[in-house]
Amino acid sequence: MRIQIVAPAPPGSTRGNRITAMRWQCLLRELGHAVELQETFAADRPTDCVILLHARHSHASVLSVSEQQPRVPVIVCLTGTDLHIDFAPQSSDSASREIQNRFQAVQQSLELADQIVLLEPQGIQKLPQAMQKKCSVILQSAEPVTNPNVPPSDCFLVSVLGHLRPVKDPFRTALAARLLPPTSKIKVQHIGDALTDQMKLAAEKESRTNDRYTWLGGISHQQAMEQLAASHLTVLSSEHEGAPSVISEAIVNQIPILASQIDATVGLLGIDYPGFFAVGDTQRLATLLQAAETQPEFLDAIKRAMSPLISKFTPQRERETWKSVLQNVGVA
């Protein structure tokens, strides 16, 4: 079948939507489909199905498919911004016109969708019951790095992977590292583009003034995976997420994770996962970092909790889930 994937991120982007779209393109081609990756829907191209990432940013494309090719099935993938910001309940009296417009764009995209894809199971509960009936969860797969570098022996290396955006709470690990005792050998390496000048200045200042923190900026996805695989530990401190790919990437590379306890991480790691901390809780994160560095039994407990999850994040499983979703909309 001929499939268009619409992702609101340009070629060469390291944003999560683009990385996800590229992986899906490969998986769907492996299923025998002809797959094109676009930033917006190409109405002049014959197509049998359209998959769109981000209900709000791809709203115009959803409308275009509905108006120009109404018989073509539409699959909309919800992102974290969709779920936790744009589609969050708002009082009509207090909400600005812009907020209302965003809400309505997401709502209309989901109403027009034949199938809704989420990247973690907890998010389904945020949708109206009528929409839940057409939801599927597709866990993002990852593959382990081939011949990874051995983590350094002269420090305990903590990686942070994520672009510098407020929703990522990007400097939480750096702040926690400042609370560690002088005897700690923890070093934090942060990978990700600064999306504003203000964030860039903040990261540069933190790198100058915090001996435990280094901002490496934006690098290729492959380089980021190699850095992750050479770490002792990784931290995800986001205030909310749709489903952070670093979770699956860390799991398949068997890199222990400390994560803020949000819907996405609970959905992917399980409610009893031992490496959670509350959003914004710098002291708790510092305590967990110190435990990971100094208490082998704590690190072993995290690894034991992660081990059964590896099989959930294989490309084969993601590919088979996509096969089922496509069959639901009549694309064999």
Image (cartoon, grey):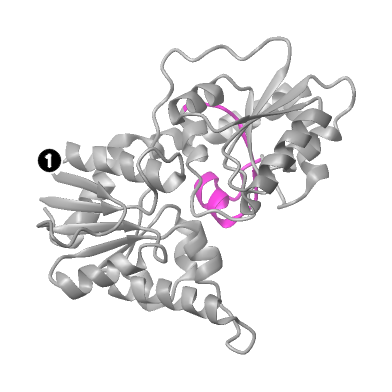
Q: Which residue is mark 1?
A: 32
Residue drawn where x is 35% and y is 68% of the image: 59
Q: Is residue 270 magenta?
A: yes
Displayed quadrant of residue 58? bottom left
Q: Is residue 167 left or right of residue 107?
A: right
> Is residue 288 among the parts visible in the rendering?
no
Residue drawn where x is 34% and y is 52% of the image: 7
Amino acid carrying mark 1 in the image: Gly
Start-end of magenta stretch: 253-274
Mark 1 surroundings: few (<14), some (14-19) or many (≥20) residues within 10 A: few
Q: Nearer the viewer, residue 151 or 91?
A: 91
Q: Position of residue 245 (x, y in %)?
A: 47, 41
Q: Is residue 310 left or right of residue 180?
A: left
Q: Is residue 108 left or right of residue 71?
A: right
Q: Position of residue 246 (x, y in %)?
A: 51, 38
Q: Is residue 53 magenta?
A: no
